[in-house]
Amino acid sequence: MISEELSQKRSMAGRIGAAVQRSRHSPVAYTATARATFLRSFVPDDPTLDEKEKHLRAVAARRAYMLQLALKSAQVRAKRVAARKGRVARR
């Protein structure tokens, strides 16, 4: 088991490393490969579509996916707020 002091030192070293990386490189540049790979997961397998149409559909599918995540997140937050209000009301 890692001691709390060692854990804090590692956390601080990671934060420093991230700050140095951001100071030297654009975050857009060092995340480009990951973003392109993520977008490829939404590209339709339809061979009749040209590349431009595949890209447009992949972007739309990604947007729909993100909106679905946002909706689920909002529902969970609303449920937590309702639960908190319920606990306060019982007191």
Image (tube, rainbow, N blue to C red):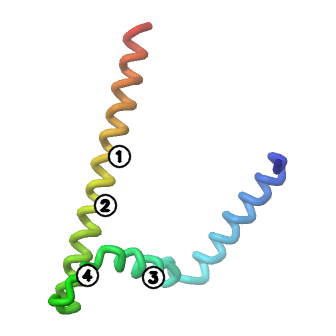
Tell me the CA gap for discs 2 and 3.
18 Å
Q: Secondary structure under badge 2?
A: helix
Identify residue for label 1: 73
Q: Judge the density around disc 4: few (<14), some (14-19), many (≥20) Cα neighbours within 10 Å.
A: few
Q: Position of residue 82 (x, y in %)?
A: 34, 25
Tell me the CA gap for discs 4 and 3.
22 Å
Depth check, mark 4 against mark 3: the one in front is: 4
Q: Residue furthest top?
A: 91
Residue depicted at x 17% and y 85% = 53
Q: Judge the density around disc 2: few (<14), some (14-19), many (≥20) Cα neighbours within 10 Å.
A: few
Q: Secondary structure under badge 3?
A: helix
Corner quadrant of residue 22: bottom right
Q: Earlier in the sequence, mark 1 or mark 4?
A: 4
Location of the C terminus by quadrant is top left
Corner quadrant of residue 74: top left
Mark 4 belongs to which amino acid?
Asp
Identify residue for label 4: 45
